[in-house]
Image (tube, rainbow, N blue to C red):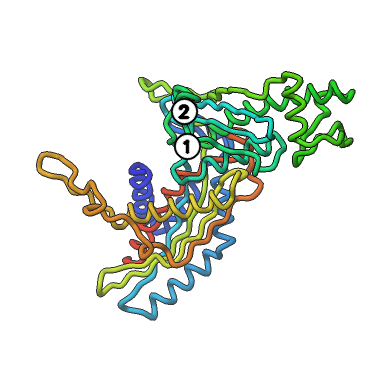
């Protein structure tokens, strides 16, 4: 985050020297597929330009600028500012060995599916996403899937739930475990109904052989498989492939993929009181193919507010001997409802599915935090 802020500051300074708007330089320097990062990794699929162009068009950035200029001409004591904040954020732990997760899945004879994964649910919605993964993989209703609390006696040697990779790692491990059970069930159905395993499908809890409904419901299939002594449990470990990083050389491919996005900020500054409001934030965010759109929207909005708080009100106080003094909620001001933008529009980039995470989705926890940097530059723009 600090590095991104410094570089946005450099762009703002360069724009002033050149006599152009900062967003002109931002657009010219957006990543393209195949571009190489300083650490040697090449961009696999860049959606930076798509997000930028769509945000500018969808939210009519030219009109936003026009209205801001008109307002500033008519008002002396209050001024409006605008800014654009593009985001590129790599997803994975840079400590390569942490990019692994296990999942243990049990299918019980009553038809319920219990998922034991390494992810810790802390309000970010990872359990809901694991339910989606198991439900869609097995072809059963989401109501039949339950995610048990994380316990290292069931899933050992867990990596932290961090790096915006909780759903990626644990989702893929859960998907793999469910596929193991599904393949056993498909072989069992094929043997009983004279078809090939690859022709068997389970949709909405109904079993199909090709286009033929074999009149077996999920719960009945599970019981029959149990009677036939089919293993209805599976454990899987997912380790993100093709990533590595040599810290001695600072070179490698440390990330599975990158998340992109663009936010447009509108702010108003009270020149007499020295206060400000964030009037509106308009975002186009690349979340891939979202597993849970409402959860991901909440993640974007929450990270945005956290980022605005970081940029505009965070104050870290230290003692003379270096101890952090602002280490509790009584001494550290967190953003609240009054710090929230009056308008927040979030649009997910369409047709952005990709093969590097689980079911075409992308990590969403941390990248939107960076949008908050735009608040600083929008306020700065109003002051100019």
Q: Is 201 situated left or right of 346 in this image?
A: right
Q: Residues within 10 Å of mark 2 (few under 14, many from 20)?
A: many
Tell me what residue is drawn at x 48 percent, y 71 percent.
66
Q: CA distance from mark 2 to mark 1?
A: 8 Å
Which residue is painted at 65% across and 44% down in the image?
Answer: 143
Would you say the residues marked 2 and 1 are in contact, meaning their CB atoms lie under 8 Å apart? Answer: yes
Q: Earlier in the sequence, mark 2 or mark 1?
A: 1
On the image, the x and y values in percent for residue 379 come to: 35, 63
Estimate the x, y position of residue 113 in percent, counting from the top left: 63, 34
182 above or below 348?
above
Where the C terminus falls, by quadrant?
bottom left
- Quarter of the figure with the N terminus: top left
Q: Return the x and y of residue 149 as percentages of the image width and height.
A: 48, 35
Q: Is residue 354 visible?
A: no
According to the image, label 2 marks what residue? Answer: 254
What is the residue that sits farthest to the left in this orientation?
320
Name the element at disc 2.
loop
Is 357 in front, or is 167? 167
Residue 175 vs 184, above or below: the answer is: below
Residue 274 drawn above or below residue 317: below
Residue, disc 1: 90
What residue is drawn where x is 57% and y is 56%? 347
């Amino acid at each position: 985050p600090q590095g991104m802020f410094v570089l946005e500051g450099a762009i703002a300074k360069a724009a002033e020297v050149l006599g152009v708007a900062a967003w002109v330089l931002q657009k010219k320097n957006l990543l393209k597929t195949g571009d190489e990062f300083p650490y040697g990794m090449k961009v696999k699929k860049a959606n930076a330009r798509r997000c930028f162009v769509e945000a500018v068009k969808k939210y009519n950035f030219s009109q936003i600028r026009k209205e801001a200029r008109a307002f500033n001409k008519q008002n002396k004591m209050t001024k409006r500012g605008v800014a654009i904040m593009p985001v590129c954020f790599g997803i994975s732990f840079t400590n390569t060995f942490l990019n692994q997760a296990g999942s243990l899945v049990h299918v019980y004879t009553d038809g319920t599916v219990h998922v034991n994964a390494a992810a810790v649910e802390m309000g970010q919605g990872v359990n809901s996403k694991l339910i989606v993964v198991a439900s869609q993989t097995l072809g059963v209703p989401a109501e039949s899937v339950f995610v048990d609390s994380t316990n290292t006696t069931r899933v050992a040697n867990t990596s932290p739930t961090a790096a915006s990779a909780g759903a990626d790692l644990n989702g893929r491990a859960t998907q793999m475990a469910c596929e193991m059970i599904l393949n056993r069930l498909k072989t069992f159905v094929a043997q009983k109904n004279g078809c090939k395993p690859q022709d068997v499908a389970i949709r909405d809890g109904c079993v199909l052989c090709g286009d033929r409904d074999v009149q077996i419901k999920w719960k009945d299939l599970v019981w029959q498989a149990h009677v036939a002594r089919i293993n209805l449990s599976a454990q899987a470990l997912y380790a993100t492939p093709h990533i590595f990083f040599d810290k001695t050389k600072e070179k490698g491919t440390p990330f599975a993929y990158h998340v992109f996005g663009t936010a447009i900020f509108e702010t108003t500054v009270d020149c007499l009181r020295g206060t400000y409001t964030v009037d509106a934030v308009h975002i186009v965010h690349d979340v891939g193919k979202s597993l849970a759109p409402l959860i991901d929207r909440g993640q974007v909005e929450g990270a945005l507010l956290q980022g605005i708080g970081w940029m505009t009100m965070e104050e870290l106080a230290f003692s003379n001997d270096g101890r952090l003094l602002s280490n509790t909620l009584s001494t550290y001001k967190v953003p609240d409802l009054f710090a929230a933008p009056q308008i927040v529009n979030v649009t997910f980039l369409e047709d952005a599915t990709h093969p590097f995470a689980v079911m075409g989705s992308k990590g969403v926890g941390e990248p939107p935090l960076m949008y908050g940097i735009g608040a600083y530059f929008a306020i700065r723009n109003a002051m100019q």
